[in-house]
Image: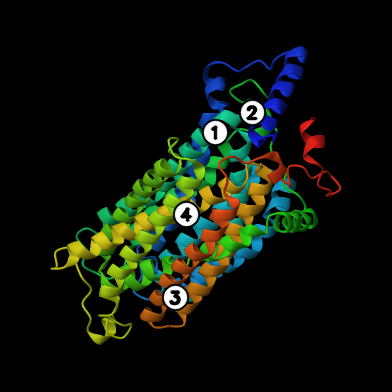
Amino acid sequence: MSTTYEEKADLDRRESQDGKQSDGTIEKRLGIKGFYYHPVTQVVMLGFVCFMGPGLFNALNGLGAGGQVDSKTSANANTAVYATFAAMAFFAGSINNKLGSRLTLQLGTTGYALYIGSYLAMNIHPHAGPFVIAAGAVLGICAGLLWTAQGSLMLAYPTESDKGVFIGIFWAIFNLGGVVGASVSFGQNFHSKASSVGNGTYIGFLILTLIGVAIPMFMANPDKMIRTDGSKVTTPRHPSWISEIVGLYVALRTDPAIILLFPMFLASNWFYTWQFNDYNGALFNIRARSLNNLVYWLSQMVGSIAIGLILDRKKLTRRTRAFLGWFILLIMVFVVHGWGYHYQKGYTRESVDVHNGFVPMDIRDSGYAAKIWLYIFCGLLDAMWQTTAYWMMGAMSNDPAKLAYLTGFYKSIQSAGAAGMWRADGVGKPYMQIFASTWALLVAGLLFALPMLYFRVKNHTDLEDEAIARMDDQGHVQPTEKVSGQ
């Protein structure tokens, strides 16, 4: 009889609790101190850190060209962001171990303030493009630190039964950053028909990101945190880079099906370039771009909740849900890109150049309603794609260590793809080529994922499928019977 990973985790939890009860339970804090040290409070604060940093970065990027007329500088800056992000993410775990999660988190937030400040500098000094690109490179390094610290704290605070709720709280607050940032931009630029964001928008964003830099200073030390079940928090430690190489190798050797998800990972940030710069940034004035940006991030929240409800529907088997999610993505990809092709074939870089007399579309212009609806569907597709990719990884394993490797693959490949695509936009590749590559890669990602779903996704994950969970300190994978105690 196979032992599920959930049964093994439950056994470990009960054994741990039995030992804890014999030694005496940890006294919980009461009053203001109890509220401050409550895990939910700290996760909410963590959410607001990412609200003020990555959330506002998303809102700024969603404006197209970072709110500027010149999309080349923005594209090159994003190339720098994702190139350094892809490299830094590999080493950030070891840095987090040395500095601690709070300091790592704070260092990570500073890059977002610098990046937004660089766009304000460019508004004041039009020739400050190199500074924006350099700030992008710094931001990539900081983003690797921030997301590593965020993941470390997010896994530490909840009990096993609360992880979904805590992650939901965090992502809801984080996504609101894009919504609020877009709302601020839309309000600031409602009466503007210019093609770039005013200084006031950048100043507002900069103030919010600086607040985000300060929040980690007021967060509790993880070592002093107590979970809701009375157990003391043990912050997860990331392996050194040498140990991580060994772990990555074991994950690939024992579960090579993950390679079939790599094209899907590559596509997950690839489409932002066309959506943000080559559609929103190319066709609309700043007022319309701001409104498009607002509805884009609102639709993200709707899309993630909608696909999440489908993927978690208990009346269907997990395999059925996997194929249903895949089919919904396939339909969405062809709806969005068939619709987008109808518009893309009607313009080029040269035809929408304001220096050639092009007048960007305003919210009051004829045909705008249909175009904003396409952008809404772009937001829905983005959220559904990202959520389903994470769900597919979760369907392959319940082991946090293995999931860390899988999400590491995801972030690195995702960032590398984004860097390449932003670079293609920065050197002026034709819009149609970028659009076609986006559509083709999304379809390829789904086609490659299909055999993985068929052969790898089961209705239950058994312990024998969890090689990393059965690996000892020397890197040897132990037999299931030895680990489960049968």
Kind of residue sitting beneath label 1:
Gln
Does 468 appear above or below 444?
above
Distance in Å between CA atoms under marks 1 and 4 = 25 Å
Q: How many neighbours does mark 1 have within 10 angstroms: few (below 14), some (14-19), or many (20 or more)?
A: many
| Nearer to us in this view, 394 or 213 | 394
> Which type of secondary structure does the marked residue at label 3 adopt?
helix
Where residue 294 appears, x then y in whole percent?
A: 30, 54
> Does the residue at mark 2 contact the one at mark 1 (Cβ under 8 Å)?
yes
The residue closer to the viewer here, 263 or 382, is: 263
Query: Would you name the residue on which mark 4 appears?
Result: 386
* Numbered badge on residue 437: 3
Q: Residues within 10 Å of mark 4 (few under 14, many from 20)?
A: some
- The x and y percentages for residue 353 are 29, 82
Q: Looking at the picture, which amino acid does disc 2 mark?
A: Met
Q: Which mark is residue 225?
A: 2
What amino acid type is highlighted by mark number 3? Ser
Disc 4 is placed on an element classified as: helix
- Quadrant position of the C terminus in the picture: top right
Along the polypeptide, which appears first: circle 2 or circle 3? 2
Q: Disc 4 to disc 2, how far (Cα)?
A: 31 Å
Of the image marks 3 and 1, the number of the one nearer the N terminus: 1
Q: Name the quadrant containing residue 185.
A: bottom left
For mark 2, give the secondary structure: loop
